Image: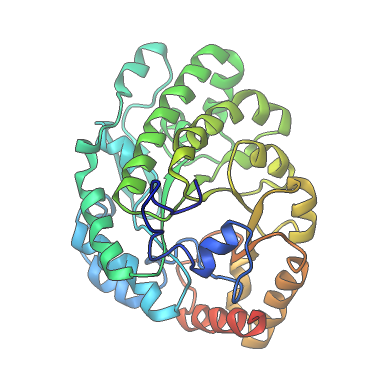
Protein backbone atom coordinates (compact mmCIF):
# COMPACT_ATOMS: atom_id res chain seq x y z
CA UNK A 1 0.00 0.00 0.00
CA UNK A 2 1.34 3.43 -0.89
CA UNK A 3 2.24 5.80 1.90
CA UNK A 4 -0.83 7.46 3.39
CA UNK A 5 -3.21 5.86 0.96
CA UNK A 6 -6.25 4.48 2.71
CA UNK A 7 -7.53 0.92 2.41
CA UNK A 8 -8.87 -0.20 -0.96
CA UNK A 9 -11.65 2.05 -2.14
CA UNK A 10 -10.67 5.03 -0.01
CA UNK A 11 -9.09 8.24 -1.26
CA UNK A 12 -5.54 9.22 -0.28
CA UNK A 13 -5.26 11.57 2.67
CA UNK A 14 -4.81 15.34 2.40
CA UNK A 15 -1.07 14.94 3.00
CA UNK A 16 -0.46 12.29 0.33
CA UNK A 17 0.87 14.66 -2.36
CA UNK A 18 2.87 16.85 0.03
CA UNK A 19 6.49 17.50 -0.93
CA UNK A 20 7.66 15.69 2.20
CA UNK A 21 5.80 12.44 1.56
CA UNK A 22 6.65 12.53 -2.16
CA UNK A 23 10.34 12.82 -1.29
CA UNK A 24 10.03 9.93 1.17
CA UNK A 25 8.51 7.84 -1.63
CA UNK A 26 11.33 8.95 -3.99
CA UNK A 27 8.88 10.69 -6.31
CA UNK A 28 9.36 14.07 -8.09
CA UNK A 29 8.88 17.06 -5.78
CA UNK A 30 8.09 20.77 -6.38
CA UNK A 31 10.99 21.63 -4.05
CA UNK A 32 13.21 19.82 -1.58
CA UNK A 33 11.14 19.50 1.59
CA UNK A 34 12.56 20.76 4.89
CA UNK A 35 11.91 19.97 8.51
CA UNK A 36 14.18 20.04 11.56
CA UNK A 37 14.68 17.55 14.34
CA UNK A 38 13.79 19.19 17.66
CA UNK A 39 12.02 21.98 15.79
CA UNK A 40 9.07 21.69 18.17
CA UNK A 41 10.30 23.86 21.00
CA UNK A 42 13.91 24.25 22.07
CA UNK A 43 14.89 27.54 20.40
CA UNK A 44 11.48 29.21 20.14
CA UNK A 45 10.57 31.93 22.66
CA UNK A 46 6.90 31.06 22.24
CA UNK A 47 7.75 27.49 23.28
CA UNK A 48 9.59 28.63 26.39
CA UNK A 49 6.60 30.79 27.29
CA UNK A 50 3.97 28.04 27.08
CA UNK A 51 6.24 25.50 28.81
CA UNK A 52 7.12 27.82 31.68
CA UNK A 53 6.76 26.02 35.00
CA UNK A 54 5.59 22.75 33.41
CA UNK A 55 7.90 19.70 33.74
CA UNK A 56 8.86 18.04 30.46
CA UNK A 57 7.03 14.75 30.96
CA UNK A 58 3.88 16.52 32.13
CA UNK A 59 3.97 18.75 29.06
CA UNK A 60 4.04 15.63 26.87
CA UNK A 61 0.78 14.44 28.44
CA UNK A 62 -1.29 17.59 27.85
CA UNK A 63 -2.90 17.28 24.39
CA UNK A 64 -3.68 20.98 23.93
CA UNK A 65 -0.13 21.96 24.94
CA UNK A 66 1.40 19.29 22.70
CA UNK A 67 -0.71 20.58 19.82
CA UNK A 68 0.39 24.18 20.33
CA UNK A 69 4.08 23.31 20.63
CA UNK A 70 4.00 21.02 17.58
CA UNK A 71 2.36 23.74 15.48
CA UNK A 72 4.70 26.57 16.49
CA UNK A 73 7.58 25.79 14.08
CA UNK A 74 5.13 25.15 11.23
CA UNK A 75 3.65 28.61 11.70
CA UNK A 76 6.98 30.36 12.21
CA UNK A 77 9.31 28.59 9.77
CA UNK A 78 7.01 27.23 7.06
CA UNK A 79 8.55 23.76 7.31
CA UNK A 80 7.13 20.97 5.16
CA UNK A 81 6.30 18.64 8.05
CA UNK A 82 5.51 18.84 11.74
CA UNK A 83 7.02 16.43 14.24
CA UNK A 84 4.97 15.34 17.20
CA UNK A 85 6.18 16.95 20.42
CA UNK A 86 7.07 14.25 22.91
CA UNK A 87 10.09 12.44 24.33
CA UNK A 88 11.51 9.00 23.65
CA UNK A 89 10.94 7.90 27.26
CA UNK A 90 7.19 8.67 27.24
CA UNK A 91 6.17 5.05 26.48
CA UNK A 92 8.45 3.80 29.26
CA UNK A 93 6.83 6.21 31.71
CA UNK A 94 3.42 5.12 30.43
CA UNK A 95 4.04 1.47 31.36
CA UNK A 96 5.13 2.40 34.87
CA UNK A 97 8.91 2.76 34.74
CA UNK A 98 10.03 5.13 37.49
CA UNK A 99 11.86 7.84 35.58
CA UNK A 100 11.99 11.58 35.20
CA UNK A 101 13.54 14.07 32.79
CA UNK A 102 15.85 16.28 34.81
CA UNK A 103 16.68 19.72 33.33
CA UNK A 104 20.24 19.87 32.09
CA UNK A 105 20.66 16.10 32.51
CA UNK A 106 18.00 14.21 30.56
CA UNK A 107 16.06 11.05 31.39
CA UNK A 108 17.03 9.49 34.72
CA UNK A 109 15.79 6.00 35.68
CA UNK A 110 15.35 5.40 39.42
CA UNK A 111 16.08 1.65 39.29
CA UNK A 112 18.13 0.59 36.24
CA UNK A 113 17.28 -2.65 34.46
CA UNK A 114 20.22 -5.08 34.64
CA UNK A 115 18.87 -8.53 35.55
CA UNK A 116 16.39 -11.00 34.09
CA UNK A 117 14.00 -10.30 36.95
CA UNK A 118 14.00 -6.64 35.92
CA UNK A 119 12.43 -7.55 32.57
CA UNK A 120 9.12 -8.11 34.34
CA UNK A 121 8.86 -4.34 34.80
CA UNK A 122 8.61 -3.91 31.01
CA UNK A 123 5.02 -4.84 30.33
CA UNK A 124 3.31 -4.38 26.96
CA UNK A 125 2.11 -0.89 26.00
CA UNK A 126 -1.59 -0.54 25.18
CA UNK A 127 -3.40 2.37 23.50
CA UNK A 128 -5.13 3.01 26.84
CA UNK A 129 -1.73 3.83 28.35
CA UNK A 130 -1.27 6.80 26.01
CA UNK A 131 -4.74 8.15 25.27
CA UNK A 132 -3.27 11.67 25.45
CA UNK A 133 -1.16 10.86 22.38
CA UNK A 134 -4.16 9.84 20.29
CA UNK A 135 -6.07 12.91 21.44
CA UNK A 136 -3.21 15.28 20.61
CA UNK A 137 -2.64 13.78 17.17
CA UNK A 138 -6.35 14.08 16.42
CA UNK A 139 -6.21 17.76 17.31
CA UNK A 140 -3.04 18.23 15.27
CA UNK A 141 -4.16 16.60 12.06
CA UNK A 142 -7.25 18.81 12.00
CA UNK A 143 -5.06 21.91 12.39
CA UNK A 144 -2.32 20.83 9.98
CA UNK A 145 -4.52 20.03 7.00
CA UNK A 146 -2.17 19.14 4.15
CA UNK A 147 1.01 19.37 6.24
CA UNK A 148 2.19 15.90 7.28
CA UNK A 149 2.72 15.01 10.93
CA UNK A 150 5.71 12.82 11.80
CA UNK A 151 5.29 10.49 14.74
CA UNK A 152 8.35 9.17 16.49
CA UNK A 153 9.79 6.80 19.03
CA UNK A 154 13.12 5.88 20.53
CA UNK A 155 14.76 2.80 19.04
CA UNK A 156 15.25 -0.30 21.21
CA UNK A 157 19.02 0.18 21.63
CA UNK A 158 18.74 3.79 22.79
CA UNK A 159 15.88 3.01 25.18
CA UNK A 160 17.85 0.06 26.52
CA UNK A 161 20.91 2.23 27.08
CA UNK A 162 18.89 4.67 29.22
CA UNK A 163 17.29 1.84 31.18
CA UNK A 164 20.53 -0.04 31.79
CA UNK A 165 22.73 2.97 32.52
CA UNK A 166 20.08 4.75 34.56
CA UNK A 167 20.49 7.93 32.51
CA UNK A 168 22.63 9.49 29.79
CA UNK A 169 26.06 7.93 29.38
CA UNK A 170 29.23 8.87 27.55
CA UNK A 171 30.75 5.39 27.31
CA UNK A 172 27.77 3.03 27.82
CA UNK A 173 29.77 0.81 30.17
CA UNK A 174 26.81 -0.99 31.75
CA UNK A 175 25.02 -1.32 28.42
CA UNK A 176 27.96 -2.92 26.66
CA UNK A 177 28.76 -5.07 29.68
CA UNK A 178 25.26 -6.54 29.50
CA UNK A 179 25.29 -6.85 25.71
CA UNK A 180 28.60 -8.75 25.69
CA UNK A 181 28.27 -10.57 29.00
CA UNK A 182 24.70 -11.88 28.74
CA UNK A 183 23.70 -11.79 25.07
CA UNK A 184 20.48 -13.73 25.67
CA UNK A 185 19.26 -11.30 28.33
CA UNK A 186 20.26 -8.43 26.05
CA UNK A 187 18.31 -9.94 23.15
CA UNK A 188 15.27 -10.46 25.37
CA UNK A 189 15.49 -6.86 26.64
CA UNK A 190 15.63 -5.43 23.12
CA UNK A 191 12.84 -7.73 21.97
CA UNK A 192 10.64 -6.47 24.82
CA UNK A 193 11.48 -2.87 23.93
CA UNK A 194 10.82 -3.43 20.24
CA UNK A 195 7.29 -4.51 21.10
CA UNK A 196 6.73 -1.41 23.25
CA UNK A 197 8.17 0.85 20.55
CA UNK A 198 6.10 -0.72 17.78
CA UNK A 199 2.94 -0.35 19.86
CA UNK A 200 3.74 3.32 20.49
CA UNK A 201 4.25 3.97 16.77
CA UNK A 202 1.03 2.14 15.89
CA UNK A 203 -0.93 4.40 18.24
CA UNK A 204 0.49 7.46 16.47
CA UNK A 205 -0.14 6.12 12.96
CA UNK A 206 -3.68 5.02 13.75
CA UNK A 207 -4.39 8.46 15.22
CA UNK A 208 -3.28 10.15 11.99
CA UNK A 209 0.53 10.48 11.78
CA UNK A 210 1.66 10.56 8.14
CA UNK A 211 5.16 9.17 8.75
CA UNK A 212 7.22 7.88 11.67
CA UNK A 213 10.84 8.28 12.68
CA UNK A 214 12.81 5.89 14.83
CA UNK A 215 15.52 7.72 16.79
CA UNK A 216 18.56 5.62 17.69
CA UNK A 217 20.43 8.47 19.30
CA UNK A 218 23.19 6.41 20.95
CA UNK A 219 23.71 3.56 18.49
CA UNK A 220 26.77 5.30 17.00
CA UNK A 221 28.63 3.93 20.04
CA UNK A 222 28.66 0.48 18.39
CA UNK A 223 30.77 -1.16 15.69
CA UNK A 224 29.03 -2.44 12.54
CA UNK A 225 29.51 -6.04 13.68
CA UNK A 226 27.97 -5.38 17.08
CA UNK A 227 25.11 -3.47 15.47
CA UNK A 228 24.29 -6.30 13.08
CA UNK A 229 24.44 -8.96 15.78
CA UNK A 230 22.92 -7.18 18.76
CA UNK A 231 20.69 -4.34 17.51
CA UNK A 232 19.55 -4.76 13.92
CA UNK A 233 17.06 -7.62 14.63
CA UNK A 234 15.16 -5.52 17.18
CA UNK A 235 15.06 -2.42 14.96
CA UNK A 236 13.90 -4.55 12.04
CA UNK A 237 11.10 -5.95 14.21
CA UNK A 238 9.84 -2.40 14.87
CA UNK A 239 9.87 -1.43 11.19
CA UNK A 240 8.24 -4.72 10.15
CA UNK A 241 5.47 -4.19 12.72
CA UNK A 242 4.35 -0.92 11.10
CA UNK A 243 5.09 -1.81 7.48
CA UNK A 244 1.48 -2.63 6.69
CA UNK A 245 0.30 0.92 7.38
CA UNK A 246 2.05 2.22 4.26
CA UNK A 247 3.48 5.32 5.95
CA UNK A 248 7.13 6.25 5.34
CA UNK A 249 9.48 4.94 8.02
CA UNK A 250 12.58 7.00 8.82
CA UNK A 251 15.63 5.72 10.70
CA UNK A 252 18.08 8.14 12.31
CA UNK A 253 21.11 7.87 14.55
CA UNK A 254 24.01 10.10 15.61
CA UNK A 255 27.60 9.25 14.73
CA UNK A 256 26.36 6.44 12.51
CA UNK A 257 28.45 6.97 9.39
CA UNK A 258 29.87 3.46 9.70
CA UNK A 259 26.39 2.03 10.32
CA UNK A 260 24.48 3.57 7.41
CA UNK A 261 24.44 0.34 5.41
CA UNK A 262 23.10 -1.94 8.14
CA UNK A 263 20.72 0.78 9.39
CA UNK A 264 19.23 0.86 5.91
CA UNK A 265 18.85 -2.92 6.05
CA UNK A 266 16.70 -2.62 9.18
CA UNK A 267 13.75 -1.73 6.97
CA UNK A 268 13.33 2.04 6.86
CA UNK A 269 12.19 3.83 3.70
CA UNK A 270 14.31 6.88 4.57
CA UNK A 271 17.70 6.86 6.27
CA UNK A 272 18.75 9.92 8.28
CA UNK A 273 22.35 11.08 7.92
CA UNK A 274 24.24 13.18 10.44
CA UNK A 275 26.64 15.91 9.30
CA UNK A 276 29.81 13.81 9.35
CA UNK A 277 29.21 12.05 6.01
CA UNK A 278 28.41 13.88 2.73
CA UNK A 279 25.04 12.96 1.27
CA UNK A 280 26.46 11.41 -1.92
CA UNK A 281 28.79 9.18 0.12
CA UNK A 282 25.91 8.31 2.45
CA UNK A 283 23.88 7.22 -0.58
CA UNK A 284 26.73 4.93 -1.65
CA UNK A 285 26.86 3.37 1.82
CA UNK A 286 23.09 2.93 2.16
CA UNK A 287 22.60 1.59 -1.36
CA UNK A 288 19.71 2.05 -3.81
CA UNK A 289 16.03 2.03 -3.00
CA UNK A 290 16.10 4.44 -0.06
CA UNK A 291 15.49 8.16 0.31
CA UNK A 292 17.94 10.06 2.53
CA UNK A 293 17.37 12.78 5.09
CA UNK A 294 19.87 15.40 6.27
CA UNK A 295 22.37 16.74 6.90
CA UNK A 296 23.45 20.32 7.76
CA UNK A 297 25.56 20.62 10.91
CA UNK A 298 23.31 22.33 13.53
CA UNK A 299 26.25 24.50 14.63
CA UNK A 300 26.42 26.11 11.16
CA UNK A 301 23.28 28.07 12.07
CA UNK A 302 25.34 30.17 14.48
CA UNK A 303 27.40 31.58 11.59
CA UNK A 304 26.49 34.38 9.17
CA UNK A 305 23.50 34.06 6.84
CA UNK A 306 25.90 33.88 3.91
CA UNK A 307 27.85 31.03 5.51
CA UNK A 308 24.64 29.16 6.32
CA UNK A 309 23.53 29.41 2.71
CA UNK A 310 26.94 28.29 1.45
CA UNK A 311 26.92 25.21 3.70
CA UNK A 312 23.29 24.44 2.83
CA UNK A 313 24.23 24.66 -0.85
CA UNK A 314 26.95 22.06 -0.25
CA UNK A 315 24.37 19.70 1.23
CA UNK A 316 21.98 20.25 -1.68
CA UNK A 317 24.71 19.75 -4.26
CA UNK A 318 25.85 16.51 -2.62
CA UNK A 319 22.21 15.36 -2.58
CA UNK A 320 21.45 16.38 -6.15
CA UNK A 321 21.64 12.85 -7.52
CA UNK A 322 19.68 11.12 -4.78
CA UNK A 323 16.49 9.17 -5.45
CA UNK A 324 14.77 11.20 -2.74
CA UNK A 325 16.04 13.87 -0.35
CA UNK A 326 14.50 15.48 2.73
CA UNK A 327 16.58 18.43 3.93
CA UNK A 328 17.22 18.41 7.66
CA UNK A 329 19.94 19.08 10.15
CA UNK A 330 22.42 16.36 11.00
CA UNK A 331 20.98 16.32 14.52
CA UNK A 332 18.53 18.43 16.55
CA UNK A 333 18.16 22.20 16.68
CA UNK A 334 20.47 23.51 19.40
CA UNK A 335 18.60 25.38 22.18
CA UNK A 336 20.31 28.75 21.63
CA UNK A 337 19.80 28.79 17.84
CA UNK A 338 18.34 32.02 16.44
CA UNK A 339 14.86 31.05 15.19
CA UNK A 340 15.20 33.53 12.32
CA UNK A 341 18.17 31.52 11.03
CA UNK A 342 15.90 28.49 10.70
CA UNK A 343 13.21 30.50 8.91
CA UNK A 344 15.78 31.86 6.44
CA UNK A 345 17.16 28.38 5.86
CA UNK A 346 13.74 26.97 4.96
CA UNK A 347 13.16 29.81 2.51
CA UNK A 348 16.62 29.35 0.98
CA UNK A 349 16.18 25.60 0.41
CA UNK A 350 12.70 26.07 -1.05
CA UNK A 351 13.85 28.85 -3.38
CA UNK A 352 17.05 27.17 -4.52
CA UNK A 353 15.39 23.83 -5.25
CA UNK A 354 12.12 25.06 -6.80
CA UNK A 355 11.34 22.93 -9.86
Q: Nearer the viewer, residue 204 or 21?
A: 21
Q: Nearer the viewer, residue 228 or 331?
A: 228
**One can see residue 273 in this view:** no
**One can see residue 127 in this view:** yes
Residue 89: percent from the left, percent from the top? Answer: 36, 42
Residue 151: percent from the left, percent from the top? Answer: 40, 52
What residue lies at 58% left-to-right and 26% top-to-bottom? 233
Determine which quarter of the picture holds residue 200.
Answer: top left
Residue 52: percent from the left, percent from the top? Answer: 23, 67
What residue lies at 62% left-to-right and 62% top-to-bottom? 27
Report whether 168 appears left or right of 305: left
What residue lies at 27% left-to-right and 53% top-to-bottom? 60
Q: How is the image coloured?
A: rainbow
Residue 179: percent from the left, percent from the top? Answer: 57, 21
What residue lies at 60% left-to-right and 69% top-to-bottom? 299
Determine which quarter of the picture holds residue 88.
Answer: top left
Across the whole image, how many numbered discs are drawn on residues?
A: 0
Amino acid sequence: MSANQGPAGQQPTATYDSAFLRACRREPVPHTPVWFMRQAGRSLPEYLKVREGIPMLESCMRPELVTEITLQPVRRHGVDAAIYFSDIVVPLKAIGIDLDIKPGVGPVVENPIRTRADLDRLRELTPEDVTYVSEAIGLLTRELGGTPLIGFAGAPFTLASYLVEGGPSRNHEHTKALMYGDPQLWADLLDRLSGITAAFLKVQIEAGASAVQLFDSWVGALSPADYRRSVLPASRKVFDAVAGYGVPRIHFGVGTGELLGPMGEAGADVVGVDWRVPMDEAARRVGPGKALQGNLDPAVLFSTPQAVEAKAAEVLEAAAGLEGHVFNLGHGVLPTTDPDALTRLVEYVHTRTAR
